[in-house]
Amino acid sequence: MNLLHLDSSILGDHSASRQLTHEVVQAYLNAHADSQVTYRDLASDALGHFSAASLAAAGTPVEVRDAAQQQEVAGNEATLQQFLDSDVLVIGAPMYNFTIPTQLKAWFDRILIAGRTFRYSEAGPEGLCGGKQVIIVSTSGGLHAGQPTGTGHEELLKTLFAFIGITDLQFVRAHGLAYGEEPRANAMSAAQHYIQNELFAA
């Protein structure tokens, strides 16, 4: 199995989501030792925001693309292929201002591609990426899951993946991290217990 591990937190070594995604990956490898892991740090190796230049590069015939357009298309294609080649994704998705990090949104803008990961038909859009498993480490300073303030976070992620045919999503949650040292420790401990004892239990 090919596992794609994505981190998007800008907090580096202080990031709760980074700590937990690494624990998820290790737990997965303990259960599936023959898996291959590809790691990408979307914060330190950030994709640019999807722009008019991105669209122009994609729409320009190969033979007349300039150097910048060639680089843009090559980078976007590599990102898409990395996703397509994966069987399992582990994604760190902290909440920033009620939504996902812009770095993670930029990644989605490179993989939601008509004709590649979804297509339109007379019956409407159809996802083309079913069969992948996605594990999302969801972290936040407050408590937003199931609340209107959480619709731009976990609900958005569900919508994005469902659009391309992926419905096998599992969430590892550590919320309320800004409520004090004890609530933070309890939230992290609960997430770690879930990873170690339940996430990949037979």
Image (cartoon, rainbow, N blue to C red):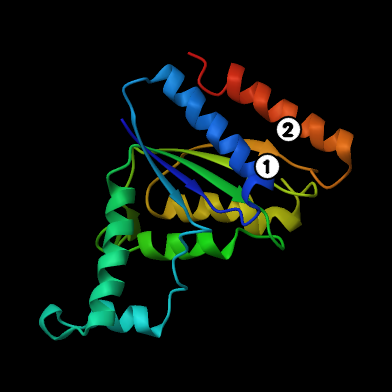
Residue 183 in percent (x, y) is at 85, 36
Q: Secondary structure at mark 2?
A: helix
Q: Tell me the tag on residue 188.
A: 2
Residue lying at 88% horizontally and 33% vertically, measured from the top left: 182
Residue 156 in percent (x, y) is at 57, 56
In the rendered structure, which amino acid carries the disc numbered 2?
Answer: Met
Using the numbered discs, state the Cα–Cα distance from disc 1 to disc 2 in whole angstroms: 8 Å
Would residue 107 appear left or right of 70 to someone viewing this image? right
Query: Badges 1 and 2: C-beta atoms under 8 Å apart?
Result: yes
Residue 202 in percent (x, y) is at 48, 13
Residue 156 seen from this side: yes
Would residue 202 appear left or right of 98 to someone viewing this image? left
Residue 67 in percent (x, y) is at 23, 81
Whichever of callouts 1 and 2 sits on the residue coming sooner in the sequence is 1
Give the quadrant of residue 193.
top right
**Figure check: 84 above or below 27:** below
Q: How many marks?
A: 2
Would residue 134 appear left or right of 189 to someone viewing this image? left
Give the quadrant of residue 126.
bottom left
Dot 2: few (<14), some (14–19), or many (≥20) neighbours within 10 Å? many
Q: Tell me the tag on residue 126.
A: none
**Residue of label 1:** 16
Depth order, front residue of 113/26 = 26
**Figure check: 82 above or below 22:** below
Dot 1: few (<14), some (14–19), or many (≥20) neighbours within 10 Å? many
